[in-house]
Amino acid sequence: MQGVRIGHFTEAKRGTGVSVFLFDQPAVGAYCICGSAPAAHELNVMDLDANVSNIHGLAFLGGSAFGLAAVNGVMRWMREQKKGWPTPFALVPIVPAAAIYDLGVNEKFPPTEEEAYQACLSASEDNTDTGRIGAGTGATVGKLAHPAKR
């Protein structure tokens, strides 16, 4: 898609990963929260009454709430690209993020800041990768339900 670069970092051994969407120009976003325990970062900047009117990227992560720390890697990449919301003291990258609960898959370690940074480096406009990659690496259903008793 022109003007949007998509990148993934997949950690199959740990069953987690990161997917990023990087916009060449600031974009307008919206969201819908589904589920009873969302792990999210900066979604409120996409509210209709928010002072910030644009976003610079989106990050989707594994690792539940722990994975949200990885968004710092996307922010670091954005800062290096000189992308962000202008403030009197610095450009502040606006990167809303959401994480899935994949802690019950393989090892219980969330994606790291460095892995999110690597997802940014791998991003391209012609990314057509599919399958269990990036943030979807450890995506399954029913992890919070207790196993059926026999």
Image (spheres, helix red, strand yellow):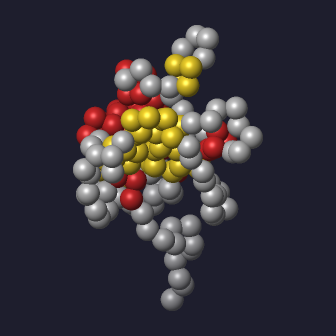
Percent from the top left, x then y, of residue 12?
28, 55
Evaluate whether residue 7 shows in this view.
Answer: no
Please give the name of the residue rendered at 70% of the width and 32% of the height, measured from the top-left corner: 51
* Residue occupying image coordinates x 63% and y 63%: 35
- Residue 51 can be seen in this image: yes
In the image as oriented, which residue stretches furthest toward the top? 89
Image side of residue 59 versus residue 12, left or right: right
Left or right: 20 in relation to 37: left
How many marks the image carries: the answer is 0
Q: Is residue 97 above or below residue 149?
A: above
Instruction: Please identify the residue farthest to the right as the structure is shown.
Output: 49
Q: Position of residue 129 (x, y in %)?
A: 26, 57
Residue closest to the far bottom = 150
Vertical placement of residue 71 versus 61, above or below: above
149, 112: nearer the viewer? 112
**Residue 144 location, quadrant:** bottom right
Q: Horizontal and vertical percent for residue 14? A: 33, 52
Q: Nearer the viewer, residue 134 or 85?
A: 85
Instruction: Write the residue at 56% across / 74% down.
Output: 146
Residue at 39 percent of width and 59 percent of height = 136
**x and y, in percent, of residue 29 in the image:** 56, 47
Q: Is residue 29 above or below residue 133?
A: above
